[in-house]
Image (cartoon, helix red, strand yellow):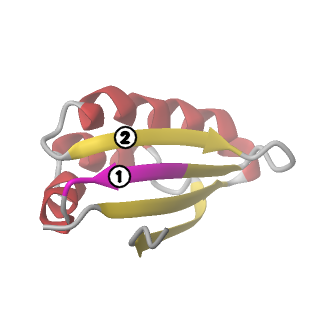
Amino acid sequence: MSQLTIVANITAKADKIELVKAELNKLIAPTLAEEGCINYDLHQDNENPAHFMFYENWASRELWQAHMGAQHLKDYLAATEGAVEAFTVNEMTRVG
């Protein structure tokens, strides 16, 4: 198994920034407790406060996929329905 890096970009709707930020923060503790989670770091853009980014490292793609089905992620999706403008995920491998 090789380590997987995830870069997830979330853009909140302008009037929903604080809601999305609060819900994203709720994901951190339960995710860090998941098997295979090495780090799960949330960032907010200094110029565009609606833009959030998770930088994550997982022991394997399989363990990250298990995370994607976790109840706390389902709860986040329900709580932020209609509040997110855009969401992209990049699966990446460290090369240097």
Q: Amino acid at mark 1?
A: Asn
Q: Provide the residue designation for mark 2.
A: 39
Name of the residue lying farthest toward the front: 96
Name of the residue lying farthest toward the right: 47
Q: Provide the residue designation for mark 1.
A: 57
What is the crowding at mark 2: few (fewer than 14 residues within 10 Å), some, or many (at least 20)? some
Provide the secondary structure element on which disc 2 rests.
strand
Q: Residue at x 68, y 54 (%)?
A: 13
Number of marks present in the image shown: 2
Give the side of residue 34 with respect to residue 40, left or right: left
The quadrant of the rendering that contains the N terminus is: bottom left
Give the side of residue 49 with respect to residue 35, left or right: right
Q: Is residue 56 magenta?
A: yes
Give the side of residue 38 with respect to residue 80, left or right: left
Q: Mark 1 or mark 2, which is nearer the start of the sequence?
A: 2
Labels 2 & 1 near each other (Cβ < 8 A): yes
Q: In the depicted view, which residue is nearer to us: 47 or 80?
A: 47
Q: In the depicted view, which residue is nearer to us: 59 or 16?
A: 59
Q: Residue at x 35, y 52 (%)?
A: 57
Q: Residue at x 17, y 38 (%)?
A: 34
Residue 66 falls in image quadrant: bottom left
Q: Which residues are magenta?
A: 54-59
Label 2, label 1: how far apart the Cα atoms are: 5 Å
Q: Is residue 75 visible?
A: no
**Where residue 68 is drawn, which disc sits there?**
none
Q: Is residue 50 magenta?
A: no
Q: Residue 63, how many percent across, how many down? A: 14, 57
Q: Measured along the vertical axis of the image, is residue 59 above or below residue 17? A: below
Q: Residue 45, how many percent across, how many down? A: 75, 47
